[in-house]
Amino acid sequence: MANSCFVQTNGLRLHYLDYGNENAPVLVCIHGLTGNAHNFDAVAPHLARSYHVLSLDVRGRGDSDWGPPETYSYTQYASDLAGVLDTLGVGSASLLGTSMGGIISMIYAAGHPHRVERLALNDIGPELDPAGIERIVQYVSTAPLEFRDLDEVADYYVGTYPIMAGIPRPSLLEFCRSTAKQIDSGRWVWKMDPAVRRPPPAGASTRLPDLWGAYCKVEAPVLVIRGSESDLLSPATVERMRAVHDKTRVVEVPGVGHAPFLTEPEALAGLKEFFGC
């Protein structure tokens, strides 16, 4: 069982889960756009055999403080990651990022190349397929804000991510408890600042930073895990990642879209080999 911890950085109280093994090298896990630290609960115990695994709630998500809406940016998230590591006295670490967490990790690794030992990217790269972006924008902006009960939250996940229909109901409900919370009215809401789901104001720039430039500055070995059915990370992008960074390894997870849970046999085997677990 992970310990729930907090750290103060950049004016916010940020939450993270500590899976133990304090004397081992540090591995920080960073979730996707609407995820939270608990997204790594299933894979972390495998990695904690060789690493001191920490899983971060990005600002505005999970149990971390909400920030001003204008601070929900990749550069700010990377700055938060730097602040967390500095506050905890971590000189260098390995990173595992899913989707948005992978973008944060690439930006951090580009700015701190000598402080990143290994970098694992879960179904994300320096270039995003427009079809995947459109799908994500659609489900993020149209998701219900409240639910009658936890079962309704679970039903929403099954309807939005059909792969979750294969998860036993008790496990799915436990997952939902990490993504939603009950409020005084008895209804359930997301454990996330509603501003994260709002579309940017008209005229605002929605472009990503120069991620190819960032990726080329990464000095650490890289593992790319791609769902074979991903609509966000294309095979062409993966091949270019290999071409521009000669220490890039790739694992493809068959029959899975964006993004793998990381407990699939192919993903887990790839992670364990890459991190030496």
Image (cartoon, helix red, strand yellow):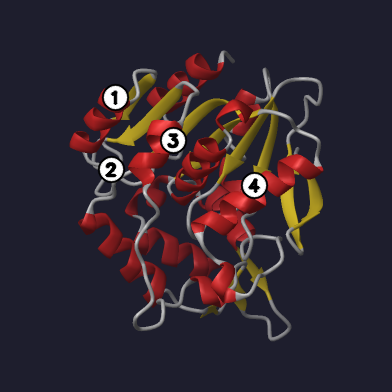
- The residue that label 1 is drawn on is 242
Amino acid type at mark 2? Leu
x 22%, y 28%: residue: 239
Amino acid type at mark 4? Leu
| The image quarter in which residue 55 lies | top right
Please identify the quadrant where the C terminus is shown: top right
Q: Quote the CA–CA distance across marks 3 and 1.
A: 13 Å
Is label 4 in a helix, a strand or a loop?
A: helix
Is label 1 in a helix, a strand or a loop?
A: helix
Q: Is residue 274 above or below residue 209?
A: above
Q: Does residue 173 appear in this view?
A: no
**Is 258 positioned to the left or the right of 59 in the image?**
left
Of the image marks 3 and 1, the number of the one nearer the N terminus = 3
- The residue that label 2 is drawn on is 233
Amino acid type at mark 1? Arg
Of the image marks 2 and 1, the number of the one nearer the N terminus = 2
x 50%, y 37%: residue: 110
**Is 5 positioned to the left or the right of 144 in the image?**
right
Q: Does residue 199 appear in this view?
A: yes
Q: Quote the CA–CA distance across marks 1 and 4.
A: 26 Å
The answer to whether the residues at label 2 and label 1 have Cβ atoms under 8 Å apart is no
- The residue that label 4 is drawn on is 81
The answer to whether the residues at label 3 and label 1 have Cβ atoms under 8 Å apart is no
The answer to whether the residues at label 2 and label 4 have Cβ atoms under 8 Å apart is no
Of the image marks 3 and 4, the number of the one nearer the N terminus = 4
Check the image and name the residue furthest to the bottom: 185
Of the image marks 2 and 4, the number of the one nearer the N terminus = 4
Q: Residues within 10 Å of mark 4 (few under 14, many from 20)?
A: many
